[in-house]
Image: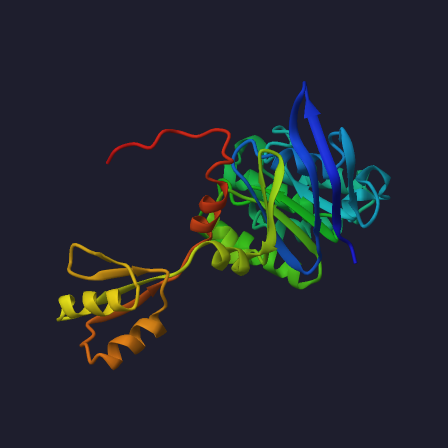
Amino acid sequence: MTSIDVTDLSKEYGGRRAVDRLTFRILPGRVTGFLGPNGAGKSTTMRLVLGLDRPTSGTATIGGRPYAELRTPLCRVGALLDADAAHGSRTARDHLRALAASNRIPQRRVDTVLAEAGLAAVARRRVRTYSLGMRQRLGIAAALLGDPEVVLLDEPANGLDPEGIVWIRTLMRRLAAEGRTVLVSSHLMSETAACADHLVILGRGRLLADTPVQEFIHARVRPHVRIRTTEPAALDDLLARHGLDSVPEPDGARTVRHARVDDIGRLMSEAALPVLELASREPTLEEAYFDLTAAEAEFTAPLQEA
């Protein structure tokens, strides 16, 4: 089992602590979403895991070893941190061929990952002619080149079109299903909710949450129920008698917070109230995330009046 283990990890830059005594474990067989506001320490942590920075204290290991001690590291760990890592004057195929040769990876893997990333038709074009989405695909192809057990992706959907977003989502799910360890940093809450099983959330360099996705959402945000009836006054009275607060909507509907459809439906049935609409609005990862991190954002913009 190849896991990423971060233990009491800290990193300081000029007296500023970017990572503050982090401890967490990223397990294989699932996609772990790595979330946090700008400046939370996500990129720094990934660099520490990959040996690109030295920690001030603590450790970050992959399969029990620091990255620098791994033999043929590209065959153990694949990473995308920067879509502009490839030299612009090289073709995509030559870029991957050089990586393969320097890491003793069979050259046949080059064409395999180019096809998987959807770049086979443009593999002989120079990288400087690529769009951001194409460079992102090339970076992901490079991460997969050594068929690694561990994959770290920083904002992999950046620059991708809708088809590309579906592709990367499907790819991450497949890698996890194959038993690999997948850590993906993203600001796209909808995409994280669609592909991640587990979350690690940072704020100002500290660990805020290490939890399964659905447990995190339901622990922080309760669902709402929207109701419409031909007898709104009777509905208001019914809800008040059961201690439920309702908010009138412009169309005459009522929204009941912290309630479930089954409970409201049972009450209305017992009271013989006609139902025109009874719908649940399930909580989202975005709502739960903002509930947790509202006080942790280092860079924020003032809210604008509508």
Please state which of residues 78 and 217 is positioned toward the viewer in this rendering.
Answer: 217
Q: Where is residue 303 drawn, in percent x and y?
A: 33, 32
Q: Residue at x 81, y 41 (%)?
A: 103
Q: Quadrant of the C terminus?
A: top left
Q: How many marks?
A: 0
Q: Where is residue 129 drawn, in percent x and y?
A: 53, 33
Q: Please tell me whether residue 265 is drawn above or below residue 198 in the rendered image.
A: below
Q: Please tell me whether residue 88 is drawn above or below residue 60 in the rendered image.
A: above
- The answer to whether any part of residue 126 appears in the image is no
- The answer to whether any part of residue 261 appears in the image is yes
**Left-right relation of 239 to 106:** left
Q: Residue at x 44, y 49 (%)?
A: 286
Say which quarter of the image contains residue 128. top right
Q: Residue at x 66, y 52 (%)?
A: 182
Q: Where is residue 92 drawn, in percent x and y?
A: 63, 39
**Left-right relation of 123 to 77:** left
Q: Quadrant of the N terminus?
A: bottom right
Say which quarter of the image contains residue 60. top right
Q: Where is residue 174 drawn, in percent x and y?
A: 62, 61
Q: Residue at x 19, y 72 (%)?
A: 276
Please state which of residues 93 and 155 is positioned toward the viewer in this rendering.
Answer: 155
Q: How is the image coloured?
A: rainbow
